[in-house]
Amino acid sequence: MLQETPLENLHLAPQTVLERAPKQGRSKCPRCNSSRMFYCYTCYVPVETVPTGEIPVVKLPLKIDIIKHPNETDGKSTAVHAKLLAPEEVTIYTYPCIPDYEGMRHEIALIFPGPNSVSINDIPLCLQNKSKKRVGCDEDSPAEPVLKCAKTESGSESDLGEHQFHSMSRNAPLKRIVFIDSTWNQTNKIITDERLQGLLQIELKSRKTCFWRHQKGKPETYLSTIEAIYYFLVDYHKEFLKEKYEGQYDNLLFFFSFMYKLIKNAKSAGKD
C-alpha cells in the first residue's frame, strides 16, 4: 500500500488518456515529429496519441513566467506541465532570456526564499509600498513585459468562469508571478541577475515534496517547479483572494500525480 500523500485527494480530470498512453508506446510530436511519451517537452504539446481535448485546461488568476536554467534537462523538468495545462497564463523562458519588467515591478513577485522574502499575507502592503516609491513612472506602461526568446501557446477552456477570472484579476494588485526552474545548486546565477532585482520576493509555506527526482542531500521541503506553482496558487486563492478553495487549480498536477503513481507502483512491484 502506498503511503497517503496530498496527491491522493485532488479533484482531477479523468486520467484515462494517460493510462492508455504507456500501452500504446511512445508517439510522435505533431510539430517536431520527435518520439515522446505523453507530451513533447520541447514544443509544449501533447503527442498524437494524447488528444488535446482530453487534457484539462486550467484558468489562473494571474500570469506566470518561468525562467528555466539552460542546463535544466527538458525531459526532467516539470515546468512544461504548467505550460501544457495553463497555456494562456504561462510562459517559459530559457536563461539568459528574461522579460523586461521595468515599470511593472509594483505588480510582480518572485517566488524564492531569502532574508527579504515575505509571506503571501504581506503581499498587499508590500506592493502598495512599492507602488508609492515609483518615481517618474509612465502612466502608459505596458500591461505585458517585453517578450524575448519566449515560447507561447494559446488555450481556450477554463476551470474558472471568465467573469470571475476578470473580476479577480482587476481587484488583485499582483498581476504576475516569476518562478525559477533549476536545481537549487544552479539558482544563484539567475536569482542574482540585475533584471530580477527589486522584485518582491515571496517564500512559500513549508510542504513536503512528492517529486520522484528529489535532489540528493536537499531537504524534502524543496519542491519541484509544478508543485511550487500549485501550492502558491492554492495559498494565494485562500489567503489573499479570500475565496473558498474547491480544487480550482488541482489539474495543474494532472501529469505530475499520474507520473508519481506510475513510478511508485513500479517501485513497489519491483520489491515484491
Image (cartoon, rainbow, N blue to C red):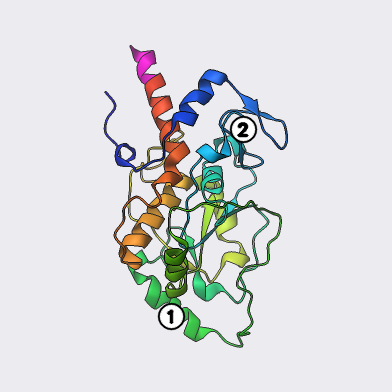
Q: Secondary structure at mark 1?
A: helix
In terms of image quadrants, where is residue 117?
bottom left
Using the image as rendered, state which of residue 37 and residue 149 is in the foreground: 37
Q: Which residues are magenta?
A: 267-272
Assign a secondary structure to mark 2. Answer: loop
Judging by the rendered image, the residue that carries numbered circle 1 is 128
Residue drawn at (45%, 66%) of the image: 163
Question: What secondary structure do most residues of the magenta stretch adopt?
Answer: helix
Gap in Å between the C-alphas at discs 2 and 1? 44 Å
Label 2, on which residue?
Answer: 47
- Dot 2 amino acid type: Val
In percent of width and height, residue 122 lies at 35, 71
Quadrant, the C terminus? top left
Residue type (three-letter) at the residue carrying disc 1: Gln
Residue at position x 64%, y 75% in the image: 142
Whether residue 58 sits left or right of residue 136 in the image: it is left
- Using a 10 Å C-alpha cutoff, classify the residue at mark 1 as few (fewer than 14 neighbours), some (14 to 19) or many (20 or more): few
Q: Is residue 271 magenta?
A: yes
Density class for disc 2 (Cα within 10 Å; few <14, some 14-19, many ≥20) is: many
Query: Could you tell me which residue is drawn at 62 percent across and 66 percent down?
Result: 195
Instruction: Decide if residue 112 is in sight here.
Output: yes
Q: Position of residue 174 (x, y in %)?
A: 46, 70
Residue 24, x across and y down, in percent: 56, 20
Instruction: Report the residue at 60% width, 85% height from top.
Output: 137
**Residue 119 in view here:** no
Of 24 and 210, nearer the camera is 24
Image position of 75 (left or right of 201): right
